[in-house]
Amino acid sequence: MMVRMQRALVTLLAWLAILLYAIPAAHASRIGYTATALGGTQWRYDYSVGNTSLDVPIAEFTLFFSDSLYANLLAGPVPPGWDVLVAQPDAGIPASGYVDALALLGGIAPGATATGFSLTFDYLGGGSPGAQPFVIVDPVTFIQLETGVTQAVAIPLPATPCLLLAGVLALACLRRRQLAAAALALSLCACGGANDPPQPPTPKIKLAAGTQAAGPYEVTALRKTAERRVSRTIYEYTFRVSIRNNGGDTGKHVRAVLADTPPGTSIIDGEVQAGSITPGATVTPADAIVLRVERTRPFVPGGLVWDITASASVALPPVRPAQVVLLPLADLGMPDGADSVRASGAISDVLLRDGSVRFSTPGDTGSDQHAQLVVSKGKRAAVFDVLIRTEIPTAVQTHVEALDDGSLPAPPPALAITGLGPNNSLLPGGLALRLAGPPALDLQHDSDGFLAAPGGAAIGLKPYWVFHPDTGSFSISATAMWQLLAALPPGALDMHLNFVSRDGAFAASYALTVLHASSVLKGQMRTPAGGNASGLAGKKILLTGYNFHQRRVAVIDATGAFYAEGILPDTYQLTLNDLEHPNAVSISAAVFPDSTSVDVGIVYPYALAQGRLAASGPIVSGTVTQDGAAPPARGAARARRRRRARPAIGRRAIRCKRR
């Protein structure tokens, strides 16, 4: 029995080794190296580069050397037909050094191998230097074709002969029944050879050295957060900036602007909004600078010259959510114009054009939102505070009655509501109401609540909710919620809740606005010829309701489509937040009370590349189809009067029909 088991094991090992040999190895292009000690800290790498995976020649490759392990890189003799460039490791950025080899002729053809590349360097680590990351790039676009890690080639047996020898030894075991030989075969199968390169260490985030003071403020550190290769020698780096307030007063609206850079460095984005900084505090705002650095020269952070100022802000009149806003520079006190504008807070889309600041506001969140605009001209900057005021507040309002002596009782406990969706949308999954803080009260008998549309009939909640004495809370199950939603009219509803204890010692009233909406709006941006306008990805459609004041934002995807759910029945203006042509692309669309699905098509009349009108004749600016029935004729007439009272800018024609 033991002999049979041994024979079966040896047979399995033999076929495993032969099978592994028969399967072609799937590996990336291989750059092998040997490391030779030259004395002291100096070493030499010799490289061979094999194109084993690409179907195009290798025309350029780059090897990287950590700034914490390598110094004094020096390329050796260059093979014929190649140009080799060296960039030293730079602790000022910090960034790895690199050696870039560019083919002057045909490069390394698929299946071929090139040798003769070498490099000497000082190794700052312990022991022997190891593998290095590499990248193969397109020499024109610098798109990465392949990435990997170099592989040491000083190995006694390559991986493939190991597998073959393992199979031979295992077959020999069949005749001698020697498990020792089988174990040797298994160990050879596991040797792997040079096809299992070591993984490069995880890069560490380090701070660039050097500080720069500007008045009471000081830039204490730069932290590199991203990098992008632009050319053979130029990299684009993104830095977060730490700023300390060395003064005795709190700085408000602190703004740091790069005024000058060291040689070899250019500014892509040199402005940081740091907000408020208290005395002695250091802040690192999310805002960042972007620099392009010529890597053949050392980067000197101390050569960055900063202009850091603090200024008071000016409050602008409140604006509404989902709105395109135009502010003439003259009205902002800048009749001579401006060089740039930056937005922070709730506003992300902003443009300086034709003597005006243009921006679009986000959708309504149910609470006020805040943003800032910084408009700059030369060294002067003006800061403007923007308040985006909600149209449908979602906060819970409380009401307490005065005591018999006329005094007011203690503030009522907060009401916790679970089960509501965004903007207090009623959902079919159930609802729970609980007073936070006090011990469980007996609220079952004298408490009540109702939902009602403005001017409409009230629907009581008592038939739908269940009281839980152990927690003093109420809940509406999913089944009861379905029944309640079926009885409610669509729209913005007022929810009133009155909680009264059985002994009358506690009484509190709460009110909030909830939304009952089941319509889904799906839209498509189209060209005048009827195709999909696919060049508008990232832009937004602003939905503004006339009656219920629902204001939403839908983002356009790469195909020109957009989507919004939870839409109330109303007449909406749908506007593209195209700041180049503000309010020019806009249509009206009525969502009927019993509609669940609404499809909207909006024509973008401008050529996407040139920003000019793509057609000169009449354009149907939009179409609307939906599965609900239109309102009665009288209601439709009122809707038409409302639409005439609020004309759409840039609207030419619109077709509406029921599917």
Image (cartoon, grey):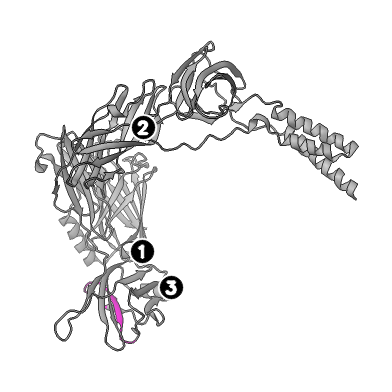
In the rendered image, residue 373, in percent from the top left (x then y), is placed at: 20, 44
Query: Three-letter amino acid code at disc 1?
Result: Gly
* Residue position marked by numbered label 1 in the rendering: 421
User: Which residue is situated farthest in the bottom direction here?
Assistant: 503
Q: Is residue 280 magenta?
A: no
Query: Three-letter amino acid code at disc 2?
Result: Tyr
| Label 1 residue SS | loop
In three-dimensional space, the C-alpha distance between marks 1 and 3, rounded to whole angstroms, equals 14 Å
| Label 2 residue SS | strand
In three-dimensional space, the C-alpha distance between marks 3 and 2, rounded to whole angstroms, equals 53 Å
Q: In screen coordinates, is 574 left or right of 138?
A: left
Mark 2 neighbour density, 10 Å: few (under 14) some (14–19) many (20 or more): many
In the rendered image, residue 158, in percent from the top left (x then y), is placed at: 70, 27
Query: Three-letter amino acid code at disc 3?
Result: Ala
Magenta stretch?
445-457
Determine whether 548 is above or below 305 in the image.
below
* Residue position marked by numbered label 2 in the rendering: 237
Quadrant where the C terminus sits is bottom left
Mark closest to the chain's N terminus, 1 or 2 = 2
